[in-house]
Amino acid sequence: MILGSVNRAITLSDLARGLGSDERAAEDALRDFEADLSAADRGFQVRHRTHGIRLESKPQFAALPQAAIPEWAPRPISEQAIEVVAIIAMKQPVSISEINEIRGIESTATLQTLRDRKLVARTAQLGPHREKYWRTTSLFLETFGVSSLDDLYKEGALEQAFPSMYSGVADDVDQAEEVEPQPDAATSE
């Protein structure tokens, strides 16, 4: 089938064109294919992604190809990279100088790593000093388990997508609330 021969999500209209049918017939064929995959305990599933549909390994079988081909195993993302991609996700489009200002540290190498991993990409927009602006990609959404950037603004979504950035934040907030305001020396006299 077409889904097995492409390594990216395709739209329903692309699938219909490939099948030589209309979208309704392609949708029916896709539904039948999904039912066939789930009825028989096969290693694949049809996933509906942000930019279309794709054929993927089922989670319980994901370790098999990774064991056979170690370079396919997912690589961990550093805390620095998570900080940078979180900034980009929340402020996009954003320039490297804005990222550096927010983090207080040079982030060019981290940004390049994120670009190499296809989690971020440059936008067409240029700043007043011809700066490059950055945005997240659909692979970012898939990697962090959100269907759209709007999902990041829902209650608790940021904590779920970026848990390492939020560990200990609640403790800091609790401690800050416990501090009693000190009377101002100028107003107490």
Image: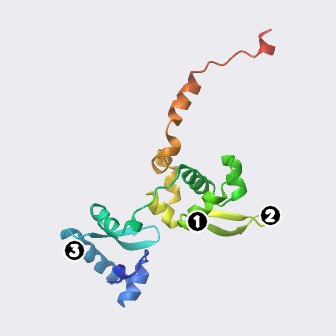
- Density class for disc 2 (Cα within 10 Å; few <14, some 14-19, many ≥20) is few
Badge number at residue 115: 1
Q: Position of residue 59 (x, y in %)?
A: 31, 61
* Front in this rendered view, residue 168 or 32: 168
* Front in this rendered view, residue 157 or 4: 4
Q: Are marks 3 and 2 in contact (CB under 8 Å)?
A: no
Residue 21 visible in the shown view: no
Q: Are marks 3 and 1 in contact (CB under 8 Å)?
A: no
Residue 73 visible in the shown view: yes
Residue annotated with mark 2:
128
Q: How far apart are marks 3 and 1 (CA)?
A: 37 Å
Q: Position of residue 155 (x, y in %)?
A: 48, 45
Residue found farthest to the bottom: 20
In the structure shown, which secondary structural element does the residue marked by tag 1 occupy? Answer: helix
Residue annotated with mark 3:
36
Q: How far apart are marks 3 and 2 (CA)?
A: 55 Å
Residue found farthest to the left: 40
Q: Quadrant of the N terminus?
A: bottom left
Q: Quadrant of the C terminus?
A: top right
At 65% from the left and 68% from the top, the residue drawn is 123
Q: Where is residue 54 in the image (x, y as percent from the top left)?
A: 38, 73
